[in-house]
Image (spheres, grey):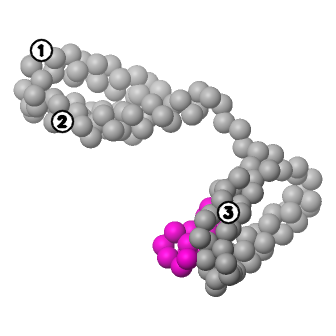
Amino acid sequence: LVAILDADQEGFLRSATSLIQIMGRASRNVEGRVILYADEITPSMKEALDETERRRRKQIEYNERHGITPQTIRKAVRDVIRADEERSRTALRRVAPRLAAQAPPDQLFEVIRQLEREMKEAAEALEFERAAELRDEIEELKQLL
């Protein structure tokens, strides 16, 4: 359930595009609902409602033609955890250069060794973009020595 308060207030978060995106996100759940609280229907609301209805009809026709029964998207917990770990790593990479500049050389060497291990693991897993990111990070840290 998504409730949009003051939906009749025009602006960035109440534009037709934003409303369509919010409604689309809610529709990923079979029981998803969006409630728009407003005193009047604005042009943005009308456009979003019309577009959502058009997409709904198109999806229903497609599902009927292909014998598809809509189901809520379900992600494995490990996929969610992996995504969260990746976000944490990304945040750490942004802060790491400042922290590394203050770290003693022996700690810096250990960090570099750990990153080199991760880089090799990424390459073996054919995650070449990740390996390249790690390589670049290692080079930055080596310049601090």
Magenta residue span: 9-23
Q: Is residue 60 left or right of residue 46?
A: right
- Ranked by sequence position, the earlier of labels 1 and 3 is 3
At mark 1, the secondary structure is helix
Of circles 3 and 2, the one toward us is 3
Q: Nearer the viewer, residue 39 or 47?
A: 39
Residue occupied by mark 2 = 97
Residue 17 visible in the snapshot: no
Magenta segment's dominant SS is: helix
For image coordinates 36% across by 33% down, the residue present is 89
Q: Is residue 125 left or right of residue 17?
A: left
130 in relation to 45, above or below: above
Of circles 1 and 3, the one toward us is 3
Q: Please provide percent x and percent y for residue 77.
A: 62, 29
For image coordinates 61% across by 65% down, the residue present is 5
Q: In the image, what residue type sits under mark 3?
A: Met
Q: Please provide percent x and percent y for residue 123.
A: 40, 28
Mark 2 vs mark 1, CA separation in Å = 16 Å
Rate crowding at label 2 as few (under 14), some (14 to 19) or many (20 or more) other CA atoms within 10 Å.
some
Q: Is residue 31 left or right of residue 134?
A: right
Q: Is residue 82 magenta?
A: no
| Contact (Cβ within 8 Å) of mark 2 with mark 1 | no
53 in relation to 22, above or below: below
At mark 3, the secondary structure is helix
Q: Please provide percent x and percent y for residue 125.
A: 47, 27
Q: Quadrant of the C terminus?
A: top left
Residue occupied by mark 1 = 106
Residue occupied by mark 3 = 23
Which residue ends up furthest to the front in the rendered image?
A: 39
Q: Quadrant of residue 115?
A: top left
| Contact (Cβ within 8 Å) of mark 1 with mark 3 | no
Q: In the image, what residue type sits under mark 2?
A: Pro
